[in-house]
Amino acid sequence: MTQRTVDIAIIGAGSAGMSAYRAARKHTDSIVVIEAGPYGTTCARVGCMPSKLLIAAADAARAVREAPHFGVNARLDAIDGRAVMQRVRDERDRFVGFVVDTVNDWPDAHRLRGHARFVKPGVLVVDGTEITARCIIIATGASPNVPSGWRSALGDRLVVNDDVFNWATLPASVAVVGTGIIGLELAQALSLLGVRVRLLGRNGKVGPLTDPALQRLSHDLVTSTLAVAADAEIREVTRQGDAVQVRFQDADGLHEERFDCLLAATGRRPNLDDLNIENAGIARDAKGRVAFDRETQQIGTLPVFIAGDVHGTRPLLHEASDDGRIAGDNAGRWPKLQRRPRRAPLSIVFSHPQIMMAGASHAELVAQQADFATGSVSFKSQGRARAMRVNHGALHVYGAHATGRFLGAEMIGPVAEHLGHVLAWSIQQGLTVQQMLDSPFYHPCIEEGLRTALRDLQGKLRLTPPANEPCIDCEVGR
């Protein structure tokens, strides 16, 4: 067996692994990045980018259907499924190519193909090579989690999001199981592109929103344009020739429907099973996850770090990249670690209407027993939203009673992807609600809806002046 000794071994060449590599190289050139699968990140190959290509096609179809409402005489004659998927694959391959080129530009000695396994602390075996490393970074990502028995029952009629972007054309019908971010985005996009879709969930929720009022609104808005059974119990899935038969129970009774395929968007699981991490002294909890410090990415007190979707905390590209940067930097400076504060949380769903969550969620604030108020705005009559015929949804903003600080927001509505950035930046800068209101709001813009929500919130806050600081309003009122 070949023996190698390096300062840092990185398992996985995805977004987190690549970021870790760049950070680690600032400290040492004794690095190896181990990858078992094809180069190209989850984002570029099967995630963010190809899904947005499909959604862009869906948005184009929706725009044509909406055009007559503006007096523009346009008609959607047909959707060419082959052309749609050809563009998705071509552009996907372009994005993947950039990533592959980057990795191939690394020195040959820094790249190793094969499956890594721990044999003892600090030692990995990769096929016929044993690697001893001062520090190890686990960045192996996550994979679709498919219910037991479905693969054997359905064969190639079962697909996951990884498979969708290799389609040669669009199917005539698909059952999408899972009402989370992936299931919602793909179900709506396929439906807008003329595919008969049934979206099936199990807990009554549609999307990730935690604010009860917004959960209900999200359910109502999505089900108004898409066939959804959000609280369904799937009794049986069977292969019927080249089709899938789905039997499910909901409040309306027992149903049977036939589809070309079943898309399982039933969550993702960390890619840890084949690493033998117990040989490195690393334990997993009941959900199969590893405990670690988010400000250092270190696992316990070991010279082992974890980064990206493999730990399942926030499976987002910018979070994975930050994870990798922190892990790579700390592996490079080991044993003198540096703690890194994390960015304000930001999550966006490219659904219709869009969904965003910035800062602390409603559920997190309730769990923390935070003393907070909620401001809200409906976009139903908001001026710019109505002009654009996107006047659906609502925004809820949260602020601390005692300090007036802005804490977080949840939203389903127009241009949520842009408002989410503004709100996350405000949280990261520690702004108060009043400071946000003191900022400019141009007319007429969707952002005026944000101002309405902030005004509502400011009016509900019970502000307390800092200790030993006179209350001006109290003095004036005397």
Image (cartoon, helix red, strand yellow):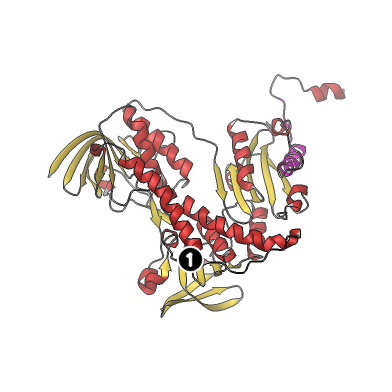
Reply yes or no: does residue 458 show up in magenta: yes
- Whether 56 is drawn above or below 78: the answer is above
Q: Residues within 10 Å of mark 1 (few under 14, many from 20)?
A: few
Judged by its main secondary structure, the magenta piece is: helix
Please state the total of marks drawn on the protein image. Answer: 1
The residue under label 1 is which amino acid type? Answer: Arg
The part of the image, by quadrant, that contains residue 66 is bottom right
Point out residue 89 in the picture as x, y percentages from the top left corner.
44, 57
| Residue at point 64%, 55% (across, down) | 353
- Residue 399 in view here: yes
| Residue at point 32%, 30% (across, down) | 25
Q: Nearer the viewer, residue 149 or 446?
A: 446
Task: Classify mark 1: helix, strand or loop.
Answer: helix
Q: Residue furthest left?
A: 1
Magenta region? 448-465
From the image, tell me which residue sits under label 1: 82
